[in-house]
Image (cartoon, helix red, strand yellow):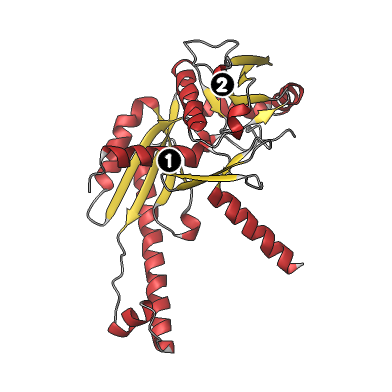
């Protein structure tokens, strides 16, 4: 029978009052080499069309994090017990290393919106943007403007990262390759530094730059590929 | 602009879904729902969930590959 995996903790048993798993199934642990994989037997929630199970997954994660360092697995991780044990043993060193890195830290989510840094240069360019037929010159002008914008945005994003880097243990962009707004980032932040982190983020805002910040979340984005268990049996 | 409580709640849910849903599996969806601007595709017995955006991109990549061959 497949198991639904919530995460891995660095302890032999669960502490605290852990909520029930999906469908009221108890949350249990599978002890492997000094670590515990937090699981439940029910996988029926994964076939339902609802966001509720994902919210419940995070609720369990938050409770676990009150008492343990947790290597969180994304919602939907399922594995047969034998394969799960083999997988954890195979990845033991990476899992331990990752648990050490995540100890006492949480993930903060950022959404960054930057006002268009370069204003349109000509009237004809505006016409071509609105769909009217433009000349080759108009086209090239528009491309130059876009390139300028992209350069300015990348420069601004680097500046933002350099400031936030100081307040976070790690910083990663989630979607800057396509330069589509809002730019999303994740930061790994020491639990005791979250107040200072929020102050730093707030200090960056001005009329051209808006940053929303949510969290603290379980550090899903900072689980290394070597430590993640994967979605399907390997 | 200061977001109101429901906007904040939607933003929180969208940020959570961005992180808590697996993003690296190519699957065929059975149903799509949308919440807080994030489309979700749930697959019955495959036991895998990914955001619709991930699946769309994966599907586009697959089509590109097929066109090349």
Task: Name the residue rendered at 34%, 54% in the picture.
Answer: A113
Location of residue A224 in the rendering, given as x and y in whole percent from the top left corner: 59, 36
- Identify the element where label 2 is drawn: helix
Left or right side of A58 for A46 = right
Query: Label 1: which residue?
Result: B15
Left or right side of A108 for A203 = left
Query: Label 2: which residue?
Result: A23
- Residue A154 sits in which quadrant? bottom left
Which label lies toward us, 1 or 2?
A: 2
Screen quadrant of the C terminus of chain B = bottom right
Dot 2 alpha-carbon crowd within 10 angstroms: few under 14, some 14 to 19, many 20 or more: few
Task: Name the residue rendered at 48%, 52% in the picture.
Answer: A175
Location of residue A166 in the rendering, given as x and y in whole percent from the top left corner: 37, 40
Q: Compute the Cα span from label 1 to label 2.
A: 25 Å
Left or right side of B34 for A205 = left
* Chain letter of disc 1 in the image: B
Whether discs 1 and 2 lie on one chain: the answer is no
Residue A27 vertical placement versus A170 (above, below) = above
Dot 1 and dot 2 residues touching (CB under 8 Å): no
Location of residue A7 in the rendering, given as x and y in whole percent from the top left corner: 58, 25
């Amino acid at each position: 029978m497949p198991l639904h995996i919530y995460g891995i903790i660095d302890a032999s048993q669960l502490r605290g009052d852990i909520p029930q798993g999906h469908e009221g199934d108890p949350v249990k642990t599978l002890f492997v080499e000094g670590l515990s994989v937090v699981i439940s037997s029910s996988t029926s929630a994964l076939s339902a069309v609802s966001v509720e199970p994902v919210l419940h997954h995070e609720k369990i994660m938050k409770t676990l994090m009150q008492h343990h360092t947790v290597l969180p697995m994304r919602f939907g991780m399922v594995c047969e017990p034998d394969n799960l044990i083999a997988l954890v043993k195979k990845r033991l060193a990476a899992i331990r290393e990752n648990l050490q890195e995540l100890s006492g830290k949480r993930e903060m989510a950022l959404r960054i919106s930057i006002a268009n840094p370069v204003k349109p240069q000509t009237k004809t360019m505006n016409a071509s943007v609105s769909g009217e037929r433009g000349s080759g010159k108009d086209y090239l002008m528009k491309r130059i403007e876009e390139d300028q914008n992209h350069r300015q945005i990348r420069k601004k994003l680097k500046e933002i990262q350099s400031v936030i880097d100081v307040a976070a243990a790690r910083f990663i962009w989630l979607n800057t390759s396509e330069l589509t707004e809002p730019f999303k980032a994740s930061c790994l932040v020491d639990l005791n530094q979250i107040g200072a982190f929020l102050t730093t983020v707030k200090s960056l805002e001005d009329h051209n730059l808006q940053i929303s910040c949510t969290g603290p979340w379980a550090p899903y984005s900072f689980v290394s590929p070597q430590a993640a268990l994967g979605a399907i049996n390997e | 602009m200061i977001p109101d409580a429901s906007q904040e709640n939607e933003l929180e849910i969208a940020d959570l879904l961005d992180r808590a849903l697996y993003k690296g599996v190519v699957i065929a969806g059975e149903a799509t729902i949308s919440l807080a601007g994030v489309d979700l595709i749930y697959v019955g017995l495959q036991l895998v969930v990914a955001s619709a955006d991930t699946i769309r991109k994966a599907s586009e990549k697959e089509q590109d590959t097929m066109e090349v061959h």
